[in-house]
Image (cartoon, grey):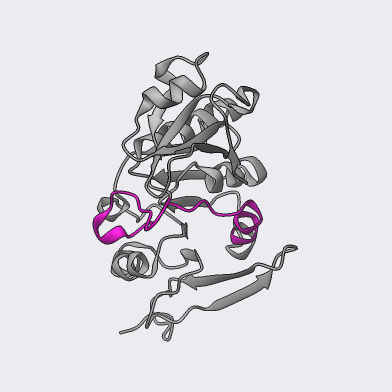
């Protein structure tokens, strides 16, 4: 939900630890909306920087402001070919992805393009599972680490500021994805080559082209929005049909 604001107004809606500012290319008004539970994105006129946010919320120090990931037009993290567009996974979908993966207490979850860390936080809090997130946006890395610290689960969750295409995926027993069609296509050979037999992969919205999923789950939420999840499992030696030859 977005709110148009007047300078100096609605300061009680600001959450810690910091605020993103985002240049808005198509207008001259300013608006903001909560992002997660611990920051706010302020949308400002094109060419604006942190000075406009300090004029809107003068009681907050400049250190609380950071550039936002792109949120309009064709948003994307700074990965090659826009592999991982920035679009937080709805919490209900997060819960269903964890259920579809049939996560266990001995699993290690890798979240590729982990954003604000919500997938790993849910896995750690609900199942006590260790997880590693890969995220290239420094603002999102900072936000996720702050949330992990607030929840006192630093011993379970590690957020790395790293391009997941360069990561060693072999320790993962579960991999969570909400990337793009191009992102999944680029990642597929890494998953097939690096993951061990029995590892599970769940992707929200996007499939893997010629790699058929083991399960496809689709549903509508209470608001009528359609969601689709894809599930793969790396085959054990001697088991055919799971992966393309």
Quarter of the view holding residue 89: bottom right
The x, y position of residue 16, in whole percent, is: 55, 24
Q: Quadrant of the C terminus?
A: bottom left
Q: For this rendering, which residue is in front, 219 or 100?
A: 219
Where residue 10 sits in the image (x, y, percent)? 63, 26
Query: Residue drawn 47% across and 29% down?
Result: 19
- Image point 32% across, 64% down: which residue? 187
Residue 165 relative to residue 32: left or right: left
Farthest front residue in view:
28
Residue 140, position as x, y percentages in the image: 42, 38
State whether residue 177 is above or below residue 45: below
**Residue found at the far right of this picture:** 222
Is residue 86 rendered magenta in the image? yes
Q: Residue at x 45, y 45 (%)?
A: 115
Residue in the picture at 42% in, 68% down: 197
Above or below for 95 versus 62:
below
Q: Nearer the viewer, residue 75 or 37?
A: 75
Q: Is residue 122 magenta?
A: no
How many numbered marks are there?
0
- Residue range in magenta is 72-97
Label the magenta part by its dominant secondary structure: loop
Q: In front: 188, or 87?
A: 87
Q: Position of residue 84 (x, y in %)?
A: 37, 57
Vertical relation: 22 (above or below) 228: above
Q: In screen coordinates, is 68 left or right of 12?
A: left
């Amino acid at each position: 939900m977005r709110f148009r604001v007047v300078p100096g107004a609605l300061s009680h809606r600001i959450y810690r630890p910091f605020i993103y500012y985002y240049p808005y290319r198509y207008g001259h008004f300013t608006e903001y909306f909560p992002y997660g539970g611990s920051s706010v994105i302020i949308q400002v006129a094109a060419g604006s920087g942190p000075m406009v946010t300090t004029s809107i919320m003068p009681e907050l120090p400049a250190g609380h402001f950071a550039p936002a990931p792109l949120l309009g037009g064709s948003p994307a993290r700074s990965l090659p070919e826009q592999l991982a567009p920035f679009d937080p996974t709805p919490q209900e979908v997060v819960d269903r992805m964890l259920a579809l993966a049939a996560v266990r207490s001995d699993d290690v979850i890798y979240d590729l393009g982990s954003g604000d860390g919500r997938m790993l936080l849910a896995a750690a809090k609900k199942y006590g599972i260790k997880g590693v997130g890969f995220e290239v946006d420094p603002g999102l890395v900072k936000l996720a680490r702050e949330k992990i610290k607030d929840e006192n689960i630093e011993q379970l969750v590690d957020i790395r500021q790293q391009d997941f295409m360069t990561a060693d995926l072999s320790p993962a027993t579960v991999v969570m994805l909400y990337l793009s069609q191009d992102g999944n296509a680029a990642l597929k050979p890494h998953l097939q080559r690096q993951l061990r037999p029995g590892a599970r992969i769940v992707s929200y919205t996007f499939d893997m082209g010629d790699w058929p999923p083991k399960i496809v789950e689709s549903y509508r939420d209470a608001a009528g929005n359609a969601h689709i999840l894809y599930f793969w499992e790396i085959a054990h030696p001697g088991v055919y049909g799971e992966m393309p030859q």
